[in-house]
Amino acid sequence: MAQTWGLDFSQIPSWEATNEFIRRHELHSMKAQQKFLIEAWGGVERRLRREIKRRTRISPFLLGASVLRTDEFVHRRYEEMSKALYARPGEQVGVDPWRDLESSARMSLARAVDAFNFLEDTELAEVAHQHAHKVAALVGGVFGCDIKYSEDTYWDTCPISLMHRRWGMSVGFTATRRCSLCGEDLDLCEHLLGTLYEVKIQRTDDGTCNACGHHSCSHIDGDIASVYPHAVKGDLQVHEISWVSRPRDPLARFTRVEFDPQILAHSLGKEPDGRDVRCYRCLHPCESFTTLQE
């Protein structure tokens, strides 16, 4: 956000700074914290939108390529921003900076949560945990978040909230392992893992390359390539799906959890009745993790 559009983030609150204020002023109640956080983050969106508008008022994206050539500096800036937004220089491109910024910010939050899930049992776990909170506060404070309502139910889909629910899913299944080169049982065929073999490149009916197992690759049908054999799983049968504290795949996590309607109504002071509900949880201090045993 700062690099692409040159925005000044020096005056924007941070998760660490607001946490320190809450601690120093002993704002223990959720209501007191929320009042302070709304005031602290209030106006940030308006200020950033105003700055973006100022920087893009004479927008090179609205000009033809011939006009851009008359101003080398503007044209150079146009090329740089076009690349940042995946557009080819010279094209007339309609741009919604705020939408692009929000999309990038929310993607950053998703990646930060993924990083913590991978680093959970390492010495970098707390660093990843703190980083995810910082990104979440920026997303929630600048762009805002609403609680998702669908199927007559309110759902917790907040990445930072779900990250603190330390459980996931593990699939119990059986499958055969066949050799990628000959299609026979990997334990019985003549090909050895870790040994190079020359094969003629061919693709299956679904487009899978017999050399690398990918659909899109640089191998050309009919060419000869030296490749290592690998296991190809088939005849997959799922037997059960379990809730576990450490899923084999760190990203095998729940993407939404139903809100208890009574707890939600109590926190709001009345029944939400399907209306939009703004969420501020990502701005608050961390309330620790919930484990499967709890």
Image (cartoon, grey):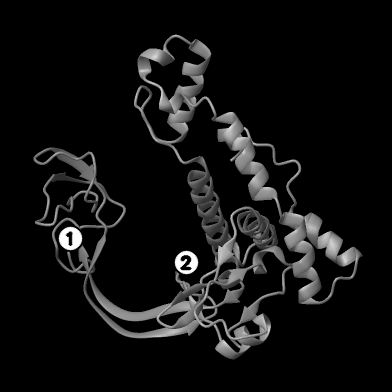
Vertical arrangement, residue 190 with respect to residue 222, above or below: below
Give left or right: position of 105 versus 86: right
Q: For this rendering, which residue is in front, 206 or 256?
A: 256
Measured from the top left, where is residue 193 in percent x and y? 29, 57
The N terminus - image quarter: top right
* Corner quadrant of residue 26: bottom right
- The circle drawn on residue 251 is 2
Q: CA distance from mark 1 to mark 2?
A: 36 Å
- The circle drawn on residue 203 is none
Residue underneath mark 1: 190
Give left or right: position of 148 versus 220: right
Q: Judging from the image, what secondary structure is the residue with disc 2 in?
A: loop
Q: Residues within 10 Å of mark 2 (few under 14, many from 20)?
A: some
Residue found 25% across the figure and 57% down from its top: 192
Q: For this rendering, which residue is in front, 239 or 98?
A: 98
The C terminus - image quarter: bottom right
Question: What amino acid is at disc 2?
Answer: Leu
Measured from the top left, where is residue 97 in percent x and y? 50, 40
Residue closest to the far top: 70
